[in-house]
Image (spheres, rainbow, N blue to C red):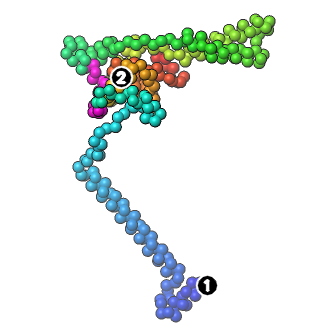
Amino acid sequence: MLEVVGERVGGWCGRDPSSSLRQAVRAKKRQHQADVYARLDAEKQARSSSLYRVKDGPVVPPPQPPQRATAGLACARCAPLSRESWRDPQGASDSGAVINILDIGRQTYANGGVVSRCLCDVAQCVNLTKYDYKDMVPEVVKDDRFQQAIEETTQQELRDGGAPKGGKTAAYVSVRRRVEASAMRILADISSAMSNNVLRFVAWACHKAIRRVAGGGCGTRAASIERLRRAKAAGLPLIFVPLHRSHFDYILVTFTLYLTGLRPPLVAAGDNMRIPFFG
């Protein structure tokens, strides 16, 4: 009905009766779509031409700050005393120098004999500093909270009826021994036993593996190493928290500390890292 009325009104106004209202609306929509597609094509062409100009033009490095921020300091709000104690007493600024830890052995034995130069990695790993790791298992066994946990578990099993038949004293002793044996097995599983010989072997293996993976070397900042050495000399406890993007994080942390003469940390890991021979 509307189309017929539109044709009649158009005929009265002298317009072509063959062009209806619906056709006019369709023509307007087509024009709008053409404008939209033309704008999109122009934007795509502009982006493409700008990318070509960037690729064909000279490489411009990003602007660098005049001085790199000091890394490795504790939070000024959470641990102000630790932050102040880690400062360089001589006030030397962080130059941003980087050490390639894979070249430490080569530099150390550069003036040695032929054997030392050819087997610099082996010589470096053999002569690394030995560190003693205290066995904490006896102290944990004597701890009051450990003994209290054993006692509470024993009483719980007695209440649940898990004790063998017999007198009260015999049942208590039997359950107590079983709970103590279970607790000692758990303690042996979670306790760490660091071996210097294993560390040397792993350091040598990491030398060979990292050289194949990272052809450019493995760098660490000299100022961070010096800061850790001052913390070690001051007797500060250190906790390393990697980003843990992969299992390679804590391996590189231990490898870097060991090669630079610092004490390798004990790594807290789950049951999935119970690898034979390595622990």
Q: Is residue 114 left or right of residue 271?
A: left
Q: On screen, 188 above or below 89?
A: above
Q: Quadrant of residue 190?
A: top right
* Tag 1 secondary structure: loop
Instruction: Please tell me which of labels 2 and 1 falls first in the chain.
Output: 1
Marks counted in the figure total: 2
Residue visible at 69% across and 14% down? 151
Residue visible at 38% across and 68% down? 38
Residue for badge 1: 1
Quadrant containing the N terminus in the rendered view: bottom right
Residue visible at 47% across and 77% down? 27
Asked whether 214 or 77 is in front, the reply is: 77
Residue 249 point in image, percent of width and height: 42, 28
Asked whether 209 or 131 is in front, the reply is: 131
Query: Pointer 1: residues within 10 angstroms few (<14), some, or many (20+)?
Result: few
Q: Is residue 241 visible?
A: yes
Q: Answer yes or no: do the residues labelled 2 and 1 have beta carbons within 8 Å?
A: no
Q: Is residue 257 left or right of residue 241?
A: left
* Tag 2 secondary structure: helix
Asked whether 88 or 41 is in front, the reply is: 88
Q: Quadrant of residue 195?
A: top left
Residue 166 point in image, percent of width and height: 80, 6
Residue type at mark 1 is: Met
Residue 159 point in image, percent of width and height: 77, 17
Query: Pointer 2: residues within 10 angstroms few (<14), some, or many (20+)?
Result: some
> Which stretch appears magenta?
93-106
Q: Is residue 257 magenta?
A: no
Residue for badge 2: 230
User: Cα distance, mark 2 to mark 1?
Assistant: 93 Å
Residue type at mark 2 is: Arg
Residue visible at 68% across and 8% down? 177
